[in-house]
Amino acid sequence: MHKGVYGAGLSKSGALSIRYLVEKRTAPESILRPLRIGFCNSKKITKIAAGCGFSLFANNNELYGSGLNNFYQLGGAVNDRKIDRSEQYYIGGKKIALPTDSGKILDIAAGRLHCLISTENKIYALGNNSHGQCGQDPEKHQFVTHNRANDQLLNILLPDNAKVVKVHCTLDTSFLLLNDGRILSFGLGEDGQTGNGIKGKTSWIPQEVGGDIKGEKIVRIGGSADTLLAANENGDLFAWGLNEYGQLQIVTDEIQVDYPRHLAFKLGSIVSVGATGSSCIISNSDGLVYTWGAQILGLGPEVSSIPRPMLLDPPLFSSVVNEDGIVSRVFSGCYSMGALTTGGNLFVWGVNRFGSLALGHSDDQFFPFQVFLPEQVRNVSLGPDHSLFITV
Amino acid sequence: MKVALTSKDIWQLLNGVLCVYKPRDISLTSIKKRIVNRIVEEGNTYDDSMNSIPLIEMPIVEPHPETEALMVVGTRQQLDYRRHPLMAGKAFRAEDIMIEQITELEPASSGICAFAIGSECYRLDDLRHQAWINTYRMIGKFGEQIDKHYIRGKVVDKAPYEHVTRHKLQKLLTRLRAQYKRASFELAEVDIKSQAAFELARKGVPRPRILDTPVVYNASVNNFNSPYFGLTIQVTGETDYFLRAFIHELGCSLGTIACTKQLRRIRMDVLGKDHALLDKELNVVNIIRNILLCNNALDLAKKERKNR
């Protein structure tokens, strides 16, 4: 079985890595249906990340990128008048060289203008660093990218040699999930995204996220905009960040929550979390999906604001008759949400920016609708202007 | 637990839906005849009306010895010949049993058939309005076209088929499923951007209100051995001809032609292979058990639909 990567959404940034879409003037600007990305065909891609106008694809050993590179999101040597090695954008995919002593690639994540890569031995960040989201001092490095010879990359120094299990990016903030359950955060913290109360000049140093999370063994983290959710190994839920739409209304009315708070919903053991700019989504070990917050929640056009989680009935996720809709994972972009069932069927809903919902039309989708892909879906990344899917 | 059945009991129980597995090359009418004949033959063995003919008092009429007028002089006991089986017929007669098929199936196809027996025949329209979603397993062959798309027919056309791969077929079926999914909302007369669409979707798959328009809910490839391929299709409002033409259209969309080699219905909404009686199992006891089973299944399904 060959792993395939499909993409949908804004094509003219080159993020879909399909050259003729950018070269031909008559090619559509928005791809409304999932299109197979030929560049990834024989590369056995297992990890994907969709950023703002750029994409990352990785297997265990190699990392590739495509799309915008104006802030060095995809690395490469600095472009100056004498040596122009880095392009402003890549329309057909390019290999991102990692230093040879890195080891295997474990996880990748993409934010608005930066990305994170975790390997066995080092953690790397590429791209814009004006808020410190690449883990370096913004006064010394406005952006982080390769050296001239394209073989070295600044890596992020971590306190006490922690081992990173997962990396996660929101728009301008970065998070590292360690194997002992702690979360380190760095980057923009003005709305409380860093979760450790640190804002301003020193927010570039990776610091542990505190609040109710201190002492907990966190295993999942999610959130694509300014609200963050996390779950520990027992399935308890924690949240912090922006509360403008009532995402944390159960514990507080403050618009900004600087330290994580425990959300004591009695919804079973939470196994998957996500948050858009105005709403939150979780799924538990029984395969049930709950959403709350504001704007498009998946309960139809008339339900636009709920303070407490509401169940999305399982029949919404069953694609054929007599098949239970048991959801294994949920995903969130800045404007859209998705749910993947155990059978490999993917359902999405939300604002349909540039057709990135891949439903075949450019209207917003108010309740979960299936994305039809030829094979079973394994992984999804919903970005702000395009989406990527990995199928078996 | 053995229950003694009388012919009266049998008549009362023969009302409902019967589920039978029709083998290939037998028409629906012959299956119906077979069922009716079995019921009549066996039912009549339960008939003990020979022993239970009541006695009645018949008046003895004789002319008056003098006036020649007819007058009743007494009564005598005799059998009520109105109830004699040679006069009234046995308990079961073929013409009395009402049996109708719920959907058609061609002789060359096989699979589960549902019949309405007895008073259920008056509710056939209701049953058909429920828009049952049926599952079929079909085997098709690329590269040949048969006269009128029959399964056993004359080959009228041939075309090259080597370029068709499993992946191409899967992509085509994916596109079809997406189109039909959208169409199923339109056929249920609901705007996909409305709250009503969400209410419909949360109850499960939207069933069409306009009948006779086939909607394919799921089509997936089971196996692919060029030129033969196996599909599982879940569809509502279909006819046998639609399915055979569907295979042909698949072939046309892939740049070749196709014909159906085998068509088998494996599910009728809630009635599956476990509910179906085989030909050799057709006797009165099994038929009655099956009717009770199917009636139960359909009632449960109705209740669940109402609860949603």
Image: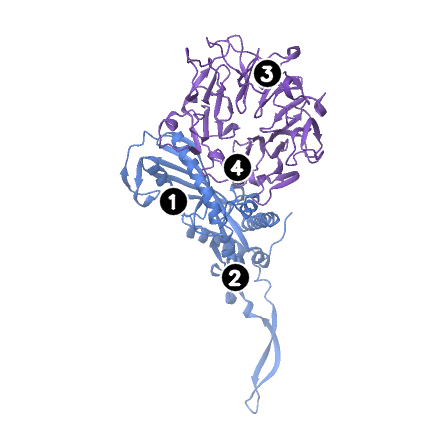
Chain colours: A purple, B blue
Residue B95 lies, in percent from the top left, at: 47, 61
Q: Which mark is residue A351?
A: 4
Callout 4: helix, strand or loop?
loop
Which three-letter amino acid code belongs to the residue tagged 3?
Answer: Gly
Q: Can I make out residue B71 in this image?
A: yes
* Residue at which label 2 appears: B90
Q: CA distance from mark 1 to mark 2?
A: 36 Å
Subunit ID for the residue under disc 2: B
Q: CA distance from mark 4 to mark 3?
A: 32 Å
Report the front residue among B153 and A94.
A94
Residue B282 lies, in percent from the top left, at: 50, 48
Subunit ID for the residue under disc 4: A
Residue beneath the point at 37% across and 38% down: B250
Report the front residue among B62 and A319.
A319
Query: Of the residues tagged 1 and 4, which is closer to the observer?
Result: 4
Whether callout 1 and callout 3 share a subunit is answered: no
Q: Can I make out residue B22 in this image?
A: no
Callout 4 crowding tier (Cα within 10 Å): few <14, some 14–19, many ≥20: many
Report the front residue among A74 and B23.
A74
Which three-letter amino acid code belongs to the residue tagged 1?
Answer: Ala
Residue at the bottom extreme of this rendering: B67
Q: Are marks 4 and 3 in contact (CB under 8 Å)?
A: no
Q: CA distance from mark 1 to mark 4?
A: 50 Å
Whichever of labels 4 and 3 marks the residue nearer the N terminus, that label is 3
Q: CA distance from mark 2 to mark 4?
A: 72 Å
